[in-house]
Image (cartoon, grey):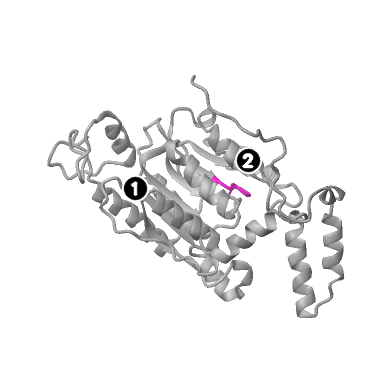
Amino acid sequence: MPLAGDDSILTVGQLWHTAASCDTWGKSTIRCGAVMSTKEFFDQVLAALRAADQDGLLSDKGAAVLGGLSGRSTVGALQRLVGLIDKSSDTLCYLEIGVFQGLSLLSVAIEHPDFPCFGIDNFSILDPNGENLGIVEDRTRRLNAANAHLINRDYEAALEDLRSYIGERKVAVFFVDGAHDYRSQLMALLLIRPYLAERAVIIVDDANYFDVRQSTRDFLIAHPEFKMVFESYSPAHPANLDRAILEKYEASWLNGVNVLVLDHANLLPVMLPRVEPLARELYVNEWLVHRHRLAELAPQALDLAQAVLTGADSSAAVAALKAAHKPEFHTRNPDRNLHCEGLPERHFTVWK
């Protein structure tokens, strides 16, 4: 560790160790020996993000094996941010939600083979043929990524029980790329909080989705010790981009990112992702849908409505709607179903 006045730069791992052993934090430095200032740390994070923005991947060691749904700048940012961590530390790790077919998890793991990398996924979405778990396991073997650890559970259950998997480690880099509904996004940010290193970096993927941006914005407002330091978006979802435009964003951040850091000293300005004026109306609609007798049929009902309103053939949409229907739906009320059966009429807490 450098002496006072030394210009050497400490890694995130060294910073975390020092922070854990000190009682007092200065406004911009940890007052316990000579430690990189908070501003210098943020500068390194921003430099890593700028390099990823300009150059994409840090390396493509797994290119012959890996494929997936992340932009090359996104994966490159993860590789570089983990590169800031002291690899001699045994108290830090990388964690992601949403492994899919292993692109981000394994790209980070093989770039930093001595650093523990964890990925949470129960492969319940984007896996119609049930193949992704086998693909991840096969790619892990082929790349000899022994430091990549798969947590095959629902993200919420895994985060509530995270200590069982990562031990006493803290999460230095956290990549959120699971289900993109509002609650899943927000709960991922809330549940990871006790496990974050003091100078953690969070990368929220698919920030083009308005509900992802809304959850990030709500989290930042409720937790002002976090700041957004970078955001990037594409003009539409990759599925709706022309081939030439898609290639541009595949080389970049694909479907958008928001990057957050812990800023205890409040050095950074407030940056909030933009949210849509229509979001409130959609969230009210969500409440109206959830209480309806046929709530589970909302996606199929919307496909049918689209076919009817555009004059398209609706036969496939009708068939899908009927196939998804279950007789037990009609045991419910037509509307205002509360799903409160079995709840106590009253229940007071008691002293331990």
Residue type of the residue flagged with mark 1: Glu
Magenta part of the protein: which range? 97-102
Q: Residue at x 52, y 45 (%)?
A: 188
Query: Crowding at label 2, few (<14), some or many (≥20) Cα neighbours within 10 Å?
Result: some
In the image, residue 152 lies at what x, y percent? 63, 37
Where is residue 221 drawn, in percent x and y?
40, 54
Instruction: Pick out the residue farthest to the left.
Output: 5
Reading the image, the residue beneath label 1 is: 225
The relative height of residue 69 versus residue 339 in the rendered view (above or below) is: below
Taking the image as shown, residue 158 lies to the left or right of residue 19, namely right
- Which type of secondary structure does the marked residue at label 2 adopt? loop
Marker disc for residue 144: none
Label 2: which residue? 154
- On the rendered structure, is 320 left or right of 6? right
Query: Which residue is found at the position 58% from the left and 40% from the top?
Result: 156
| Residue 59 visible to the viewer | no
The residue mark sitting in front, 2 or 1, is 1
Farthest top residue in view: 352
Amino acid on which disc 2 is placed: Asp
